Image (cartoon, grey):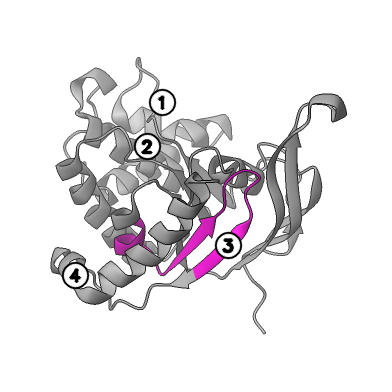
Amino acid sequence: MTRPLVAIRGVSQHFGTDGARVPALESIDLDIPDGQFAAVVGPSGCGKSTLLSLIAGLRLPSSGAVLCDGEPVTGPMPRKVGMIFQEANLLPWLSAIDNVAFPLKLRHVAKAERLDAARRMLDLTGLRGFEDRLPHQLSGGMKQRVAIARGLVQNPAVLLMDEPFASLDEQTRMVLGDELLRIWSETRKTVLFVTHSLNEAVYLADRVLVLSARPGRLVDDIRVDLPRPRSFAMTSEERFGTLKDRIWQHIKHAERR
């Protein structure tokens, strides 16, 4: 069998001391193959963001192990794993192209090389012509495109996205969702995408991972057997509704606990 790109083995995570210990995740076992687009859903506080932070190496699990391309994750691995957050978090004094190039600057990549890479990523995310704009001159959707370009600029194998469209209006979310699918089809990055939107999860993903209420356990692993490329018309089809309802039944049960 081909080795999974991301492997999670018996991972549990808790916060606080033994006397006031709060469990966040419990006994997660998961394989994510190269090139897959996986969505992660579950009730609020179930550990979705914690799971991404463990894969990103931003924290270490209380027990178990996370591996990326066979290598144990013991800290950030920016050349292998990129992360995009709910807020774009752009540096306000830097232009769009300099924000995208900033991770390469931290690695002391030559200026011409990093700007060329940043320009390619801005082209990929549909921002040609906006390279010199400051963040306050960009719309919310454009800022998130810059954040996606920044996440891609180091060419990581894995792209983690923690509710990147949550602060945007529905129309902008739909547009960026289609843009994200276009980018994914061109790059074939392995994507883990956290969302509260069941429509978004089914529309974007190959696979939907459903977590229980805290402590988060993997309660369902749903293959999204809808053809690609996806289209908005699919959202009104019976199969789309069936998949969404399957997810909702888990979340509804968890919220009643």
For mark 2, what is the residue? 147
Under mark 1, the amino acid is Asn
For mark 3, what is the residue? 219
For the residue labelled by badge 2, is the local secondary structure a helix, a strand or a loop? helix
Label 3 close to label 1 by CB (< 8 Å): no
Q: CA distance from mark 3 to mark 1?
A: 33 Å
> Sequence order check: which comes first, mark 2 or mark 3?
2
Left or right placement of residue 30 versus residue 200 in this view: right
For the residue labelled by badge 1, is the local secondary structure a helix, a strand or a loop? loop
> Sequence order check: which comes first, mark 4 or mark 1?
1
Q: CA distance from mark 3 to mark 4?
A: 26 Å
Q: CA distance from mark 4 to mark 1?
A: 33 Å
Crowd tier of the residue under label 2, counting other residues whose Cα lies within 10 Å: few below 14, some 14–19, many 20 or above: many
Q: Is residue 248 above or below residue 45?
A: below
Crowd tier of the residue under label 3, counting other residues whose Cα lies within 10 Å: few below 14, some 14–19, many 20 or above: some
Q: Which residues are magenta?
A: 201-221
> Could you say where residue 14 lies in the image, as x and y percent from the top left?
74, 37
For mark 1, what is the residue? 89
Instruction: Evaluate whether residue 40 shows in this view.
Output: no
For the residue labelled by badge 3, is the local secondary structure a helix, a strand or a loop? strand
> Sequence order check: which comes first, mark 1 or mark 2?
1
Nearer to us: label 4 or label 2: 4
Question: Which residue is at 24% across, 48% downward?
Answer: 176
> Sequence order check: which comes first, mark 3 or mark 4?
3
> Sequence order check: which comes first, mark 4 or mark 2?
2
Label 4 close to label 2 by CB (< 8 Å): no
Under mark 2, the amino acid is Ala
